[in-house]
Image (cartoon, rainbow, N blue to C red):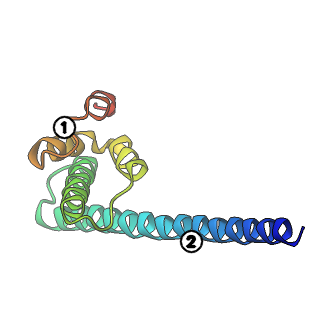
């Protein structure tokens, strides 16, 4: 009877550890996504600002689209670099959101240039292209 009780308590501790590990993993993933989203926003804003200073005759929305696509291209390059090194990864959700935020050309060029997720048929066919 005590053996059964000890197994039950051990199972509870294991469940508690599993829950803690899950929460820690989710927190870490959120921090990584927040970090990469910050990089994407910083590159977009810097490109838009620098483009406005260097090319004042070009329409603002064209510079914005160019900056978003460059930032998305860099995001795919970072993900490929981290995938090769087996370290942090840029989440699929963030890559999708960057493509949906008018960065689909940058996503397509980044996938082809870095040969990132080009063998996976689902990724190749489901990206939102304009």
Horizontal and vertical percent position of residue 104: 27, 40
On-image quarter of the N terminus: bottom right
Q: What residue do we see at 25% from left, 34% from top?
A: 120
| In this rendering, position of residue 82 left or right of residue 4 | left
On-image quarter of the C terminus: top left
Q: Which image quadrant for residue 26?
A: bottom right
Q: Is residue 96 above or below residue 83?
A: above
Query: How far apart, in angstroms, are the residues tagged by discs 1 and 2?
Result: 31 Å
| In this rendering, position of residue 126 left or right of residue 21 | left
Q: Earlier in the sequence, mark 1 or mark 2?
A: 2
Q: Is residue 52 above or below residue 65?
A: below
| In this rendering, position of residue 113 left or right of residue 28 | left
Horizontal and vertical percent position of residue 111: 18, 43
Q: Is residue 38 above or below residue 123?
A: below
Which residue position is annotated with label 2?
Answer: 24
Q: Element type at marker 2?
A: helix
Which residue position is annotated with label 1?
Answer: 118
Q: Which image quadrant for residue 90?
A: bottom left
Q: Which image quadrant for residue 126?
A: top left
Closer to us: mark 1 or mark 2?
Answer: 2
Horizontal and vertical percent position of residue 101: 37, 45
Q: What residue do we see at 52% from left, 67% from top?
A: 25
Q: Residues within 10 Å of mark 1 (few under 14, many from 20)?
A: some
Residue 71 numbered tag: none
Q: What residue do we see at 33% from left, 67% from top?
A: 88
Q: Nearer the viewer, residue 69 or 125?
A: 125
Q: What residue do we see at 82% from left, 69% from top?
A: 3
- Look at the numbered discs 1 and 2 and tell me whether their residues touch, using CB distance below 8 Å: no
Q: Element type at marker 1?
A: loop
């Amino acid at each position: 009877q005590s053996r059964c009780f000890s197994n039950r308590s051990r199972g509870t501790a294991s469940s508690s550890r599993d829950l803690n590990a899950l929460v820690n993993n989710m927190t870490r993933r959120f921090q990584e996504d927040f970090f990469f989203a910050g990089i994407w926003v910083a590159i977009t804003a810097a490109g838009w600002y620098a483009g406005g200073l260097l090319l004042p005759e070009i329409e603002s929305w064209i510079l914005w689209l160019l900056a978003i696509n460059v930032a998305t291209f860099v995001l795919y390059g970072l993900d490929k670099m981290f995938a090769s090194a087996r370290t942090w990864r840029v989440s699929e959700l963030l890559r999708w959101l960057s493509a949906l935020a008018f960065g689909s050309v940058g996503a397509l060029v980044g996938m082809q240039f870095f040969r990132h997720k080009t063998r996976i048929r689902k990724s190749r066919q489901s990206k939102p292209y304009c």
